[in-house]
Image (tube, rainbow, N blue to C red):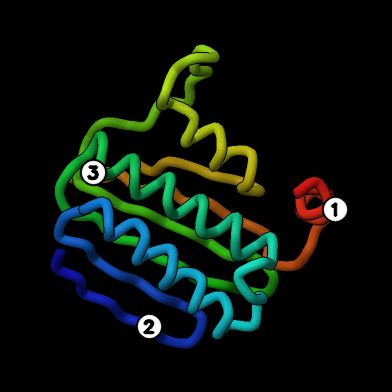
Amino acid sequence: MTVIAQSTGQQFSVTLREIEPEAVAQMRCIVRAHLRLWGVGDESHPAVTDAQLVVSELLANVERHARGACELKLSQVGSTLTIEVRDESPDLPVLREPAEWDESGRGLLLVQSLAESWEVTRYELGKSITCRLATSESPSSASRAGAA
């Protein structure tokens, strides 16, 4: 795995030349460390666990569907965390409702349920998926924390 990373203020970006299974776990750790550094909270804070899950799902989609290099960007402005994953595949993600026994196909449903908003942007070479999450406890994140 080749990694090129840059971090300034409350922004972080990393380019992964290829996604390997251990890269997803490493990126979760990096996300957790940056959010702690930025004052969001420790690993049990709902925004941190949500961000790690969103990053995992988006990178797993790159590994499974796009292949090749991708860029992960994190930034925080106020109480909004923006997560962006950009890859070189022209194929757009499809939000679908998997059958009960399907072993895959729930990633974007998870992203949609955790993010305040998400969007796909097509580029000449590839696409990006951008998600915005609240980093302060909102009523929905507080209820998820209470349910856990």
Residue sitting at 56 percent across and 75 percent down? Answer: 35
Name the residue tied to disc 3. 126
Q: Position of residue 53 (x, y in %)?
A: 51, 52
Q: Position of residue 90 (x, y in %)?
A: 22, 35
Q: Position of residue 113 (x, y in %)?
A: 64, 39
Circle 3 SS class? strand
Say whether residue 86 is left or right of residue 33. left
- Closest to the observer, 131 or 47: 47
Name the residue tied to disc 1. 139
Question: Of tags 1 and 3, which is closer to the observer?
Answer: 1
134 in relation to 78, above or below: above
- Closest to the observer, 93 or 60: 60
Circle 2 SS class? strand
Name the residue tied to disc 2. 7
64 in relation to 38, above or below: above
Mark 2 belongs to which amino acid?
Answer: Ser
Corner quadrant of residue 70: bottom left
Mark sitting earlier along the chain (2/3)? 2
